Image (tube, helix red, strand yellow):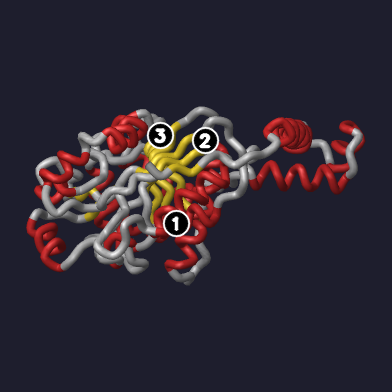
Amino acid sequence: MARLRRTSSSLSALEEQNALAVQVARLYYHQGLTSDEVARELKLSRPKVSRLLTFAKQTGLVEIRIHDPQALPQSLEAKLKERYPFLTPHVVSVPLGSSEDIWLDRVAIATANLLNAHLRPSQTVGLAWGTTLDAVSRALTPKNIADLTFVQLNGSANSLNLVSGFVADTMARFAHNYGAQAHLFPVPTFFDDPRTKKAMWRERTVRHILEIQEQADVLIYSIGSVTAKIPSHVYVSAYLDEPNLRELAQAGAIGDIATVFYRADGSFADIPFNKRASGPSLSIMRTAKWALCVVSGLGKVSALRGALEGRLMNTLVVDEITAHALLYAED
């Protein structure tokens, strides 16, 4: 089974830098010392103090958040929390009049910062590939986390590729960024026959990946929607043909997570097409310690609302325009 090995690095040197950056940040932010005062107290140069403060922000050791009760993102977060009490929402500000490409970039950066702040040593992270997670992988800032493991949640092979380079590259960026291991899942995204899937799920190498998936402490994924303006990768890369799309529409499917489809009420168990899907049961999104869903774009509003109705996440990163539409717009 394909596997990306941990990159070598001087962990002790990075730990020392992290410790010094935290010490500098505490003096600067908590105790209110100036850069000059911090430099004198720690016997550092002022440029060194400035670099350590920048490092602390970039790596998530310090998270700066402006709490303005009149600000739209914070107001939307409060309303999302009121409507969905199980949810921890992070609403990302975007420039007025900007395009959805910009929204996705801002959401990807916010997600990368959130991951640096919350990922911990020895965790197993289940990762569902797609356009949004590809953007997140490109926004990551390096941080070595000991014994971190990434595992691909759904297969990526289709009729054109045995294993998609798009997916492998996304996994590789996450692994390299954190000095982690990554376990790929080179099985078909969708099987032609559910019986073939059942047979393959009995194979020892496949079982090994499934067992790692079951151990995941963290799940990171987005939502796929056929109506998204920035196309979901699974809908534009020969994974689904027209008969497949008609079948899904007849079953009432409104979106997918890890290529497993669900309806507007969040139900998924009795959608026939899911018997051919390689992704996990969406019930794991309800029980995971941290189920992080990353969404951007107005074309995903209906699918996002359905996922929330089904409680298929406990944490959401979303741009403010999409969040506003989710709360106030009619489908």
Q: Earlier in the sequence, mark 2 or mark 3?
A: 2
Q: Earlier in the sequence, mark 1 or mark 3?
A: 1
What is the three-letter code of the residue carrying label 1? Answer: Asp
* Label 3 residue SS: strand
Q: Earlier in the sequence, mark 2 or mark 1?
A: 2
What is the three-letter code of the residue carrying label 2? Answer: Leu
Q: Which residue is mark 3?
A: 290
The alpha-carbon separation of the residues under discs 2 and 1 comes to 18 Å
Question: Relative to 160, is 69 above or below?
Answer: above
Dot 1: few (<14), some (14–19), or many (≥20) neighbours within 10 Å?
many
Q: Look at the image and tell me in which quarter the C terminus lies.
A: bottom left
Q: Which residue is mark 2?
A: 119
Query: Label for residue 134?
Result: 1
- Which residue appears at 68% of the width and 33% of the height? 11
Q: Percent position (x, y) of residue 100?
A: 42, 67
- Nearer the camera: disc 2 or disc 1: 1
Question: Relative to 291, is 299 above or below?
Answer: below
What is the three-letter code of the residue carrying label 3? Answer: Trp
Residue 72 appears in the picture as rendered: no
